[in-house]
Each structure stands twice: as C-alpha cells, then as structure tokens.
Image (tube, helix red, strand yellow):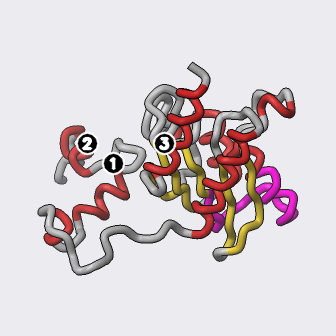
Amino acid sequence: MMPGPSQDNRRESGADSPIGPVRQAARSLPTQYCEGKKPDMPPSFPLPAAMVRALELARGAAEAGEVPVGAVVTRDGIVIGEGENRNRRDNDPTAHAEIVAIRAAASRSGDFRLSGCDLYVTLEPCAMCAGAIAHARIGRLYYGAPDPKGGGVEHGARVFSQPQCHHRPELYGGLGEAEGAALLTGFFSARR
C-alpha cells in the first residue's frame, strides 16, 4: 500500500491553506496567466454589483463614524441581506457588517442556513464573523482587503482551516481590495 501524502506535499498543494483551493485553481490556468503575460482582456474587470454595494455600505459606515466595512449576501445573484459596521451606533460588539448582513439574510429567507448563498465583504472577516459564516453555511465568501491584524480567514485564527470547522465556504480574497483598503486607510488616517 502506498503511503499517504507527506506534510510537505500537502503544504505544496495548498491543502493546509485556507485559500488553497483558489491557489490550486490558479495553478491550472493557462500559462499566459502564470508567466506574467497579459491575456487579451481589458486591464481590469468591473467589480460585481454586490461588491460595489458592499463598498457603498462601507462608505456609509464611515460617514456614521464606524469602521468602514460593508457586506452583502446574495442568493442566485439577488441581494437578500446587507449590512455595515454598526458597533458604536448599536452599542453591540457583534454588529460587524457580516453579522448584520447574515442576520438580515436569514430573516428574509426564513432560515438560519444560507446554503448556496454568497457573501461579499470589503475586509477579510474576523474570527467571530468567520464562525458565523461557517454556521450559516455560506457557500462562497468574496472579500476585499486582507486584515493581517484582525482577520480570521487568511490571517490570525484561520477559522476555515481548523479541524473543528465543519463547513468551509469557497474563498476568494482580493476582490475590490484596493477600494476597500483605501476606505480603511482614509478612515484611520483622519483619526490620527
């Protein structure tokens, strides 16, 4: 009987990485994508409408004095929940944009399981939000700016790579990263 994959092989394949499947998929792209050659396409793609809406919500949060993060839940391309950070306004430490959007989507759908739904958020979710995403059974998570200090997906707790995590959404980081990061940088530099 052949021995199983070594730890080094699993690491190389991306199996231990929370965004391993995305990186693995990138390896299967035509070589024009992998060798720095630009294919015949526009220099940038437009953001999906749900991410554009999440960025609008993030701007609204900033105007209200909240950390600018916005989130949108869609099912079959239709928005069923949205939210922005509301911690200060609601005096609620759990009122992160993702939690607000998930609560709205669950209420609207009449089910706390959001299987087959997509979540778009402007910042990498924290560990609390990643836990809620797993419990809600969100199918795909698209997030903008990475969060090395407080993130719980690609950084920090890496919730979806833990054996205790029973549901792992498909992960797509970097969607609207520049726009989300600019909102955060502007917000915090104005307060220093």
Residue 95, magenta (yes or no): no
Magenta-highlighted residues:
102-119
Question: In which quadrant will I find the C terminus?
Answer: top right
Rounded to the nearest angstrom, the CA distance separating label 2 from label 1 is 6 Å
Q: Residue at x 23, y 68 (%)?
A: 28
In the picture of the structure, the residue carrying the numbered disc 1 is 15
Q: Earlier in the sequence, mark 3 or mark 2?
A: 2
Visible residue check, residue 137 = no
In the picture of the structure, the residue carrying the numbered disc 2 is 11
- Residue 31 x %, y %: 14, 70
Label 1 residue SS? loop
Of 99 and 63, the residue lying toward us: 63
Rounded to the nearest angstrom, the CA distance separating label 3 from label 2 is 29 Å
Judge the density around disc 2: few (<14), some (14-19), many (≥20) Cα neighbours within 10 Å. Answer: few
Q: Of circles 3 and 2, which is in front?
A: 3
Residue at the bottom extreme, as displayed: 40
User: Dots 3 and 1: beta carbons under 8 Å?
Assistant: no
Residue at the top extreme, as displayed: 192
In the picture of the structure, the residue carrying the numbered disc 3 is 181
Left or right: 151 with respect to 82? Answer: left
Q: Residue at x 49, y 43 (%)?
A: 182
